[in-house]
Amino acid sequence: MADSHVKMAQTTPQEVIVAVVAGLLAPLLAIVLIVQLVLGFQKEHKPDTSGEAAQQATLSRIKPFAQLAALDASAPKVEKSGQEVYDTACTACHAAGALGAPKFDNKGDWGPRIGKGYDTLIKHAIEGFNQMPARGGNGDLSDVEVARAVAYMANSGGASFKAPEAEAATAAATPAAADAAPAAASSSKPDPAKGKAVFASNCAVCHATGVAGAPKVGDKAAWSARISQGFETLHNNALNGIRGMPAKGGNPSLPDADLVNAVGYLFTEAGGKL
Ligand code: HEC
Ligand code: HEC
């Protein structure tokens, strides 16, 4: 009796272990089986990517990236907006006014600087000015990106400089873009007087000061060889882009009639006869 009692006392812990292990294994096994079931189920129902509908869906999913890549091909890179440039490259000093930088959104700081004119401010931001490092210390920024950031900042301080991307947005938002079709009918007749305003808002950012190697407006030496190509070739090159010149000056929504007028303006300002 005492013997069997001892034996029972000895086996009980083993039984407990077996019971515990079995108790653990059972749910584990169940989990493994369920996971396998789910995986198998997913495999069976994997979308058939060879189907036309599936390919269409894939195309529409990657379209935004494909379009970015297409933009990339016509321009050296996708230009950032003024706000994006400011947020990444200028805010470090211009948010709080470090080193005496004119503060964002501060009319007192920007007033006298705005008086220098957009072109001078762009020049100073590109080349550097006293404690202001060239391109805010970010050599990767293009001239246009810096110009946009300058407009974004100066406008926060009371200026109304027209940055290229703001133009593109308003042109797309106003019915003017929709009017483009009838206007394009007379596209072979450039109107330089109308082109002046188009130039100011779409082309001046490069052609006013000659940034990025753009021929400066009214600079006969820079334009004479170009003018001898004839108006149609110049219009075509401005339409499709050539070397550093982005297609339509980087504004895809610019109506062709406006482009024709702007080229006409550049053409006649440099002494070309239409
Ligand atoms: C390291 C700090 C720093 C960074 C980064 C910086 N700035 Fe500045 N910026 C300054 C300072 C300091 C001044 C004032 C210089 C002066 O007037 O002596 C200034 C002045 C300016 C001015 C006015 C120039 C003038 O003629 O009055 C412009 C425009 C400007 N910055 C644009 C930019 C842009 C655009 C960026 C980003 C791409 C940028 N800055 C990034 C420090 C900076
Ligand atoms: C981002 C800067 C930039 C903008 C914006 C821009 N251009 Fe240009 N443009 C250039 C550069 C750079 C060249 C010189 C290209 C070359 O010959 O290498 C150029 C050249 C040209 C030429 C001469 C092409 C040739 O065959 O010699 C015309 C015409 C022209 N631009 C018209 C325009 C018009 C019109 C606009 C506005 C709708 C405009 N550009 C906006 C940078 C720009």
Image: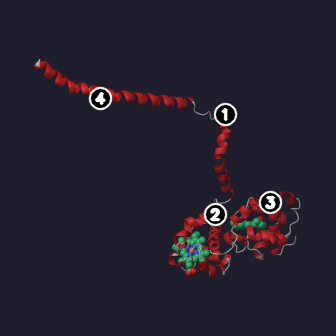
Circles 4 and 1: CB distance less than 8 Å?
Answer: no
Task: Give me the C-alpha separation between circle 2 and circle 1.
Answer: 39 Å
Q: Residue under label 2, please give it.
A: 81
The x, y position of residue 105, in whole percent, is 59, 73
**Residue 214 shows up from this direction:** no
On the rendered structure, is 212 left or right of 46?
right
Residue shown at the point (63%, 80%) measured from the top left: 111
On the rendered structure, is 273 left or right of 37?
right
Amino acid type assigned to the residue bearing label 3 in the image: Pro
Q: Residue under label 3, please give it.
A: 175
**Ligand 1: image quarter:** bottom right
Of the 4 image quadrants, the one containing the N terminus is top left
User: What SS does tag 1 mark?
Assistant: loop
Counting residues from the N terminus, which is met first, the one under dot 2 or under dot 4?
A: 4
Counting residues from the N terminus, which is met first, the one under dot 4 or under dot 3?
A: 4
Q: Assess disc 1: are there few (<14), some (14-19) or many (≥20) residues with their C-alpha within 10 Å of its C-alpha.
A: few
Task: Give me the C-alpha separation between circle 2 and circle 4.
Answer: 64 Å
Task: Give me the C-alpha separation between circle 3 and circle 1.
Answer: 40 Å
The x, y position of residue 74, in whole percent, is 69, 57
